[in-house]
Image (cartoon, rainbow, N blue to C red):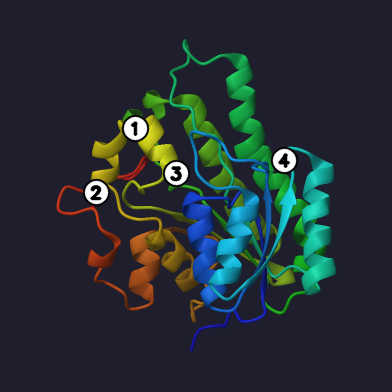
Amino acid sequence: MGASLKGRTIVMSGGSRGIGLAILLAAAKAGANAVLLAKTDRPDPRLPGTVHTAVEEIQAAGGQAVAVVGDVREEDDVARAVAAATENFGGVDIVVNNASALNLAGTLELTPKRYDLMQQINAKGTFQLTRAALPQLFESEDPQIVTLGPPINLKPEWLGRFPSYALSKYAMTLLTLGFAAEFAERGVRANCLWPQTTISTAAVANLLSGDEASRRARSPEIMGDAAVALLTDAERPTGQVFLDVEALARAGVTDLSSYGGGEELELDFFVDEF
């Protein structure tokens, strides 16, 4: 029988909307608490939701949540998020490295400033949030780290398409696999989770040709359910990269029709086949 999320506390970077919020909503329904560290204090006209509306949705789903307005790139903000989890819920059981910057420009088109932004949010953010939470994770009965990092696919098609973005995402994956090895003796488990297909979020609609891209994508709920399946997996895996469909299959879920996308699903970045 798998572990329960009841009463367990998640600290997540981002989470105001999209996949991050879907994960927190699914976890809330399973009884988890949440602390969200995100910059979205006020609505963005291009993207729905703020850290505050996310808390309202989590509470409506039956969970408890605390918003921390801050930037995962800033050490003090990350420390405040971990402190909020300790003060409100008694500690940290799960870290979810969700916040990520996406820029698909090639090397000549990408400015150094945009390059730095991706590396700082994706790579440094994963390192910084995990590092800050480790003292609390060591006190948990079942400490876990889940990072939204892709399988490391070294085919030229992926290496050459957007090297800087690939570097930042592969860094998230490598760090997480490294945490699994580094802290195995402390009982910390660390895995990556990645969608098999594109996911219908506002970011996808804005960056990848709008309605057509969304039509060929699954809903964010598949990642929420997959994350809960991974976090409660009875076999207690660690040091692995799972696609959402793999995490669900391990839990006995193979009918994915409720997540939409029709028959013309589009594979996500770094994924080669269904």
Would residue 178 be seen by someone viewing this image from the given angle? Answer: no
Q: Residue furthest bottom?
A: 1
Q: Secondary structure at mark 4?
A: loop
Mark sitting on residue 208? 1
Binning the other alpha carbons within 10 Å of mark 4 as few (below 14), some (14 to 19) or many (20 upward) gives some
Q: Secondary structure at mark 2?
A: loop
Asked whether 36 or 98 is in front, the reply is 36
Q: CA distance from mark 3 to mark 1?
A: 22 Å
First in residue order: circle 4 vs circle 3: 4
**Residue holding disc 2:** 273
Q: Amino acid at mark 4?
A: Asp
**Residue holding disc 3:** 152
Q: Amino acid at mark 3?
A: Ile
Image marks 3 and 1: residues in contact by CB distance under 8 Å: no
Q: CA distance from mark 2 to mark 4?
A: 35 Å
Image marks 1 and 4: residues in contact by CB distance under 8 Å: no
Q: Secondary structure at mark 1?
A: loop
Image marks 3 and 2: residues in contact by CB distance under 8 Å: no
Q: CA distance from mark 4 to mark 3?
A: 27 Å
Binning the other alpha carbons within 10 Å of mark 3 as few (below 14), some (14 to 19) or many (20 upward) gives some
Q: Residue furthest top?
A: 108
Mark sitting on residue 71? 4
